[in-house]
């Protein structure tokens, strides 16, 4: 049974929202301001699992988090897609013309950059966490400073919402991974998605051959991400997500890929969050 969850950020953050929706409101939360701190919380058994954003429908993949999962031998046991609505928050009684600076996480700023083109007087400042900025504005009564955060953060820290849904794309999803130090907690019959990592030689058609194996085994490729291999120039590791109807299809493909590729690693077997 999951009793404690590590999240990046504080209560009121989007990671906190995922923890509540995935595990319920009663689970204990370890607030971590960095993803390194979040990983350490799981590795030291301070938390049973961690929730980690991995990609966004507007800004794309959060590349360093792939490396964190791989390097620390974490396993993905679940995923959650959150509809992310960014709101501009500030102390009550202010208008957007009063705002000189907006502080937020770099991903949030990237997702909202089109909105701020109409306000050239506002300086965008990168920060560690969306909800933590909202908390500081409330605690220090900071005038002229705004945060990009959730409506929940506005309620928790008693801030006004100056503008709602300021992200460039109104349908804005972030995919979150639920990670643990051991592999799947599910029965194989409930598993219909997997994340794997492998490396390939520089040979013509080597990647195409792997993709053909996946197709022959009736796997659906939903994500492929390449990362450079450290200490080896121009060699890459491939991080791949696949879905399937039967776990046996994945097992068959895995057996063949293990022969064809180098350093095959199963990063996680879990239930498709899109179903």
Image: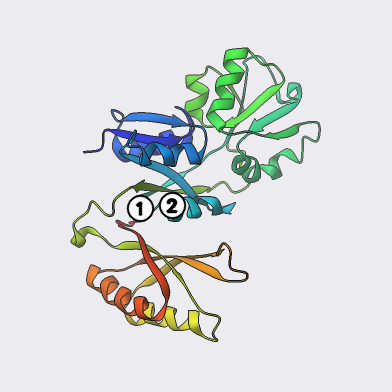
Q: Is residue 231 above or below residue 150?
A: below
* Left or right relative to 123: residue 14: left
Q: Quick one: quadrant of the C terminus?
A: bottom left
Q: Is residue 264 above or below residue 145?
A: below
* Left or right relative to 151: residue 50: left
- Where residue 192 sits: x, y (%)? 28, 62
Residue at coordinates 49% horizontally, 79% vertically from top-left? 207
* Of the pair 257 and 109, the residue shown nearer to us: 257
Q: Quick one: quadrant of the N terminus?
A: top left
Any part of residue 62 in sight: no
- Where residue 249 sits: x, y (%)? 27, 74
Question: Residue 76's mark?
Answer: 1
- Where residue 155 sits: x, y (%)? 48, 21
Residue 196's image quarter?
bottom left
* Left or right relative to 74: residue 120: right
Helix, strand or loop at mark 1: strand
* Left or right relative to 126: residue 250: left
Question: Residue 150's mark?
Answer: none
Question: Residue 69's mark?
Answer: 2
Residue at coordinates 62% horizontally, 69% vertically from top-left? 233
Helix, strand or loop at mark 2: helix
Residue at coordinates 61% horizontally, 19% vertically from top-left? 137
Residue 218's image quarter?
bottom left
Q: Residue furthest front?
A: 231
- Where residue 41 sits: x, y (%)? 39, 36
Residue 220's image quarter?
bottom left
Q: Is residue 89 above or below residue 81?
A: above
Q: Residue furthest bottom?
A: 204
Residue at coordinates 63% horizontally, 41% vertically from top-left? 106
């Amino acid at each position: 049974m999951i009793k404690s969850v590590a999240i990046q950020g504080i209560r009121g953050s989007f990671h906190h929202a995922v923890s509540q929706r995935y595990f319920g409101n009663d689970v204990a939360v370890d607030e971590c301001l960095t993803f390194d701190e979040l990983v350490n919380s799981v590795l030291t058994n301070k938390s049973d699992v961690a929730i980690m954003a991995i990609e966004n429908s507007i800004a794309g993949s959060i590349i360093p988090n792939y490396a964190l999962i791989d390097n620390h031998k974490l396993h993905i046991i679940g995923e959650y897609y959150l509809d992310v609505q960014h709101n501009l928050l500030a102390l009550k009684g202010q208008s957007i013309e009063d705002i000189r600076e907006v502080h937020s996480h770099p991903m949030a700023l990237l997702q909202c950059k089109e909105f701020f083109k109409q306000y050239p007087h506002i300086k965008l400042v990168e920060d560690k966490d969306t909800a933590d900025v909202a908390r500081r504005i409330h605690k220090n009564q900071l005038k002229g400073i705004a945060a990009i955060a959730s409506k929940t953060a506005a309620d928790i820290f008693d801030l006004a919402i100056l503008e709602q849904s300021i992200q460039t794309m109104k349908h804005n999803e972030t995919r979150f991974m639920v990670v643990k130090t051991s592999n799947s907690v599910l029965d194989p019959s409930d598993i219909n998605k997997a994340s794997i990592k492998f490396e390939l030689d520089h040979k013509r058609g080597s990647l195409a051959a792997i993709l053909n194996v996946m197709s022959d085994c009736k796997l659906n490729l939903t994500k492929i991400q390449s990362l450079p291999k450290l200490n080896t120039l121009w060699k890459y590791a491939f991080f791949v997500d696949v879905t399937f109807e039967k776990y046996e299809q994945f097992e068959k493909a895995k057996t063949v890929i293990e022969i064809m590729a180098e350093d095959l690693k199963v990063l996680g077997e879990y239930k498709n969050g899109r179903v």
